[in-house]
Image (cartoon, grey):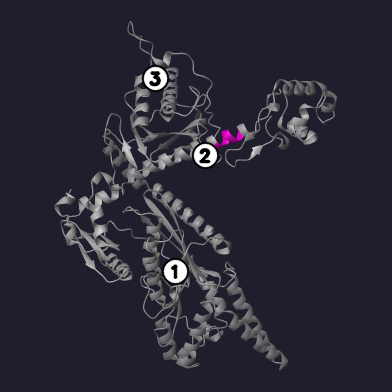
Amino acid sequence: MADPSSYRPSPGQIPDSPGVYKFRDEHRRVIYVGKAKNLRQRVASYFQDLAHLHPRTRTMVTTAASVEWTVVSTEVEALQLEYTWIKEFDPRFNVKYRDDKSYPYLAVTLNEEFPRVQVMRGAKKKGVRYFGPYGHAWAIRETVDLMLRVFPVRTCSAGVFKNAARTGRPCLLGYIDKCSAPCVGRVTPEEHRALAEDFCDFMAGRTGTYIRRLEKDMMQAAEEMEYERAARLRDDAGALKRAMEKSAVVLADATDADLIAVAEDELEAALQIFHVRGGRVRGQRGWVTDKVEAVDTAGLVEHALQQLYGEERGDAVPKEVLVPALPEDTEAVSQWLAERRGAQVSLRIPQRGDKKDLMTTVQRNAQQALGLHKTKRASDLTTRSRALEEIAEALGLDAAPLRIECYDISHLQGDDVVASMVVFEDGLARKSEYRRFQIKGFEGQDDVRSMHEVIGRRFKRYLQEKERTGEWEQPPPVSGEAPHPAQGAPLPADDTDPRDTDPRDTDPRGDDGRDDDGRPKRFAYPPQLVVVDGGQPQVAAARRALDELGIDDIAVCGLAKRLEEVWLPDDDDPVVLPRSSEGLYLLQRVRDEAHRFAITYQRSKRAKRIRSSPLDDVAGLGETRKQALIKHFGSVKKLRQATIEEICQVPGIGRRTAESVAAALASAAPAAPAVNTATGEIMEEDDGGTS
């Protein structure tokens, strides 16, 4: 690890003009490239106290052994040079997007004497016109098949073309009029190129001209009583319309735009791009990246623009680029895009209307892409094994933690305090063993105390299960010692029914959470590692709860959200796992799942409390008859004012039930209107709400 002060340049050496800088390691490899409006200010910011730097930036400056810079005249030149150097040196600490799949394009090889229409993947070639990308190659072939009726451009390979020219016989497409057969001289090279250019114009969105021309020719042929030709033109126009219908209109102003959305977490980001041409979505692609540098959404967008348009010219750069956040130097980036297009480019955040709605769709696609990427990464057996080994090594465990339990506390300003327990076995979620808790030991907000209570309750259950099955016998207490906690008073009724789970939390393995005797397993299995959501205080509380129960063979750690640091009991400094570590990725997934499970339970409890009613306490009064009463009287308030005889008039309500309802409502004093804390809405009694 290098000391940044050993290669820090003096402030007077660094110019205060725009430029690009490179950090190199001890082997002279470029590890990071950046640009700056003011080189002196930007480069100096890397040489402050290491404790004040972002962990990823700290890792970069301690890996580097030297820094150098190049002065340019404008910020646009700095942007271009940064892109060129990132492409040339491939620095390990720069964000680099990688395609989450190899997207196919519809390509027209205008660089050949007889242009060919084909499906292409990989790097773009000079002189080839590209359309897309498309999600599937078959979607391209369907579109091309429809359009070859009108634009019979060559689609055959070079070998087939040469063989047809040698024999003087075209291929099958030439015989069925889906190719103009330039191989045998049916059309001249100039006529065939004109067909290819018309094909490109139609694919670029200039569709109305061709359809109107076909319809005009069709009407003229009909007037001249050339009905066969008119029918063929009618079918050609229908084919073009069907090709257009494959991409619905999403922007009514028929604009050309690219929409970019970002979904991210602490370690990774997913990018989705929709290419809209002529108001229709003509292509879609997605990238994922590791966040190897300290970068925000605006920085991710800027990197994406560089990679997306760095090699493009002309119409490949659209008139509008819509993004979720503007780059730091919006003016310079806009000017750079305009230079590549050769005309003005609007770079902005959509605020309303169709473009805002479409951006929401693109954002949803980005979220799904990130989730799918994480799922694929988590499902690999080798990756999971490596993650568990990395966790064991980082935490000093004797063996890989095959069972991990994670706990999280959730509440809303101290109300409805709940906790969650999620279980991962061999790196995969074991949803049948998820549990959730209500905090019962105290009122109010205290995450540390709540964590202590939950861990204590969970492992008391574990000791009781061991004692029940005969796996553990309580040793007699030493004279003068307090009895072991497992021998204490019985716990309150269990509030962690395994069936009381989110509908998404069903285990595909069909485990119903019961042992051989049909009893709930509940807390029968111990984990090798307990993870808590939080830092030192929460970790200390969990360790203290285990110590009080005499359990010393279960490791404990905490994962703090802000910097993704791993905390161990009694350690003043956290364990910082490499950001590319599969172990850190697994811990983060476990923590996020515990947070999701806890907040889902907390929200359901809050909603149930808001919608509670005095009728809930009436014995024998089911949901159907409660709804009948509310529907008949309109509200609990009006029901409270009704007589027993009036209540008996409701279908299904007898006199005994009516008396029970009247007594329950009389004993329940009217309360202040409840407030839905999620929306701020006052839940009035007249709405059938609380009483």
> Residue type at mark 3?
Glu
Q: Secondary structure at mark 2?
A: loop
Using a 10 Å C-alpha cutoff, classify the residue at mark 2 as few (fewer than 14 neighbours), some (14 to 19) or many (20 or more): some
Res. 181 visible in picture: no
Q: Amino acid at mark 2?
A: Asp
Q: Which residue is denoted by mark 2 in the rendering?
A: 505
Start-end of magenta stretch: 603-608
- For marks 2 and 1, the one nearer the N-term is 1
Question: In this figure, what is the number of numbered marks?
Answer: 3
User: Callout 3: 10 Å neighbours few (<14), some, many (20+)?
Assistant: few
Q: Secondary structure at mark 1?
A: loop
**How far across and how far down the image is residue 139, in percent?**
52, 69
Task: Quickly name the residue at label 1.
Answer: 104
On the image, the x and y values in percent for residue 447 come to 43, 30
Crowd class of label 1 (few under 14; some 14 to 19; many from 20; radius 10 Å): many
| Quarter-of-image position of residue 317 | bottom left
- Which label sits on residue 471? 3
Residue 147 spot, x, y in % from top left: 55, 79
Marks 3/1 in contact by CB < 8 Å: the verdict is no
Question: Are the residues at dot 3 and dot 2 in contact (C-beta closer than 8 Å)?
Answer: no
